[in-house]
Amino acid sequence: MNMLSSQKFRFTVGCAALLLVSLASSHLYTQDQEDQSFTQQENSAPLQSQISLTSNQAADSLTSSFQNPFVSQQTSDEIIGQENTFSSQQDLLAASAPYPVVDEFKKYKFSINGSQVVTPVKLPSSKVNFNQGDLLTVLVNTRKYFQDHGSKDPDILRTGILATQGVTVPDVLKTLDFMIVVLKEDIANNRATRLQDPKFINNNFRVIKWTAHNPKNKKQKQLRITKYAVFTHTGSRKKTSTYNTPIYSLKENSITDKFYTKYTKQDVLSGIYEPGGKEFGKVQSLAYLTRTGLEEALMQGTVLINFTDGYKAFFNVDRNNGMSYIRGLKATAQKRYWYFREVDAIKGYGYKIDAKISIKPGVTFAGDVLNIGLGKVIIIEHTKGGRKHLQMGVMADTGGAFLPNLYQLDFLAGIFKSQKEFSQNISQLPEYATAYFLVKK
């Protein structure tokens, strides 16, 4: 009798347990479906997507460490170590979820399966080209940006589409740290760096191929490689008949009241800030260039001005008027206008002018920081003269043409005196290339 009662009791408890599990599973599934549906709505916040599960946990840890000025390097390493213990089930979840592509205002545009864009491969067996000292400089400056500005610039805590391959922000930092150590060791020992050896790269890094996704050209598989540069232009402190097109800098109080967001480029060039103009005195005149000089400065983001009085300096874009860049519209008709600041080097990505990353030609790519992610190390491959050429650089810059953009990179080619010199240089570079991300194993 007691045995029978015991069996009945166990049977009843077992049934109850199964019922509870079933109800819990049903709730989780329903909640998951609701979350996924919400993510794909037109203006949903992309960071709520399932694919951000792993990277967001990393971002929370990183944000916490950036906000604490007493966090040591050991703590950063612990964060990376904790990140590496995430279960393979979470990686599988990320890989199977659609990635929500966003625009420059972080508004949802469309979703794409990550496997259509990023897939694991091996790097081809050709020497990787780059200037060792210049690459080290950009790696160090990009890593420092994460350290110094991560708590103020949440955009850099987005892993982007590589989250669908289980890549996290700590993985990006670990990659930068490892490359910095290797380059410093190799340069100190006066030897060609191991980072140029494809065997070393395949042994120490995950190599992830980037297949272009161009909604307007679905046949495009390779990345379009555009090129940008810093041009040198003669300029004047005062307006003259030759140098009659101004570049301006915003004053600190101007940044607060946002008056400059009302005016298009055409408004600015009509003379509203010049003596007699309705906004005279609200901005500071930096230099006067030719119209060609201005347009090249706006397009490239940086200009090296040789002043008629002998002074020479770099000037970099600081803030724009909030008007979108329109692809396909000629430069002179664009409404977007940038205000400049004098800087000490060529500048790349940064949430404000004083924080921008100092970059070097030949080892810097500009791209879609929100959907690809700052600090990604990229190798592009193209064939020239029947031989494969590999070129390494860091995504340390961005621009309005890249948000969103999963099919293009802009390569910083150098400093040039003229468009002719620039064209001769880039004629040696590919228009399209196969691209690979490197992520430290």
Image: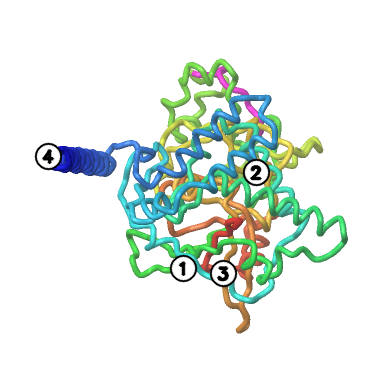
The CA distance from mark 4 to mark 1 is 76 Å
Q: Which residue is mark 2?
A: 142
Across and down, in percent, residue 313 comes to 74, 38
The disc at residue 430 is: 3
* Circles 2, 4 touching at the beta carbon (< 8 Å): no
Q: Is residue 305 above or below residue 383?
A: above
The CA distance from mark 2 to mark 4 is 75 Å
Q: Is residue 205 above or below residue 231?
A: below
Q: For the magenta stretch, what is the residue range?
A: 279-287
Give the residue displayed 44% in from the left and 54% down from the top.
Answer: 88
* Circles 3, 4 touching at the beta carbon (< 8 Å): no
Give the residue displayed 58% in from the left and 24% down from the top.
Answer: 250
Of badges 2 and 4, the one in the foreground is 4
Q: Does residue 391 belong to the magenta stretch?
A: no
Q: Is residue 420 left or right of residue 165?
A: right
Q: Is residue 206 left or right of residue 286?
A: left
**How many residues crowd around disc 4 within 10 Å: few (fewer than 14), some, or many (20 or more)?**
few
Of badges 3 and 2, the one in the foreground is 2
The CA distance from mark 2 to mark 1 is 26 Å
Three-letter amino acid code of the residue under disc 4: Met
Across and down, in percent, residue 261 comes to 44, 26
Three-letter amino acid code of the residue under disc 1: Gln
Secondary structure at badge 2 equals helix
Q: Earlier in the sequence, mark 2 or mark 1?
A: 2
The disc at residue 222 is: 1
